Image: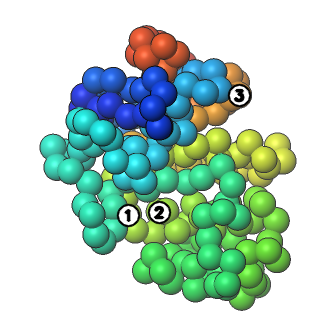
Amino acid sequence: MLEARGISFGYGSGRPLYEGFDLVVDSHERVALSAPSGFGKTTLCRLLAGYEQPHAGSILVDGCPLPKRGACPVQMIWQHPEGAVDPRLRMEQTLAEAGGAPDELLDALGIQDRWLSRYPHELSGGELQRFCIARAFAVQPRYLIADEVSTMLDAVTQAQIWRFLVSETEARGMGLVFVSHSPALTERVATRMVSLANNDLAEERSGVSR
């Protein structure tokens, strides 16, 4: 399981975003993080994926801290894919950094062969996000963190990406933690919702449509 155990975190000298915060995500869950803007949803995503270090407490996978080197068992997909890739690398090089992605994964994401030789600025946001998802899956993580990954995309691309994420995480027994401002998407995708508003951690059962 993925655990945030007693974590505390804040920026500067202001009020901490989290104090003694706990969260447990099982490997077969799809957990939606819910809260108004400014309540630290993206910060929690960064903590869970190891991009930020808690001031106190720990992030654990099966009782072990996240590794400081090598492939991390928790991978994050960002809202803005253009900021998550090296603009100087062609897309085939970006995938190679993660060890490469099998053809069946690229096919499932709708990635076309001709895109591989392009630079990030030569792709649309939806095309680039597909590469970021492929790169995250390529390292075979145990958990996936998705922070508003489809907000900037058209409706067709959103549907394609979320169908892929749900089917692939189910097939691989992979836990998913995600943020979305779409109640309809959350209701359809999440197996559980965690409210971060005021850090009350109120949890609600969500319907699951497959």
Residue at left offset 32%, top offset 57%: 73
Q: Position of residue 190 (x, y in %)?
A: 52, 29
2 or 3: tag closer to the N-terminus: 2
Residue at left offset 64%, top offset 33%: 180
Q: Is residue 14 at all visible to an observer of this figure?
A: yes
Residue annotated with mark 2: 137
CA gap between label 2 and label 3 equals: 24 Å
Label 3: element kind: loop
Q: Considering depth in this image, is 198 or 25 the residue closer to the camera?
A: 198
Q: Position of residue 129 (x, y in %)?
A: 67, 60
Residue annotated with mark 3: 182
Tell me the amino acid under the disc marked 2.
Phe
In this view, 145 is above or below 113: above
Residue 21, image quadrant: top left
Residue at left offset 79%, top offset 49%: 153
Q: Position of residue 6 (x, y in %)?
A: 24, 28
Label 3 Cα crowd, 10 Å radius (few <14 / some 14-19 / many 20+)? few
Q: Say whether residue 207 is left or right of residue 5.
A: right
Tell me the amino acid under the disc marked 1.
Gln
Q: Are marks 1 and 2 in contact (CB under 8 Å)?
A: yes
In this view, 27 is above or below 96: above
Label 1: element kind: loop
Which of pointers 3 and 1 indicates the residue nearer the eye?
A: 3
3 or 1: tag closer to the N-terminus: 1
Residue 8, image quadrant: top left
Q: Are marks 2 and 3 in contact (CB under 8 Å)?
A: no
The label on residue 173 is: none
In this view, 156 is above or below 205: below
Q: On the rendered image, what quadrant is the C terminus found in?
A: top right
CA gap between label 1 and label 2 equals: 5 Å
Tell me the amino acid under the disc marked 3.
Ser
The label on residue 140 is: 1
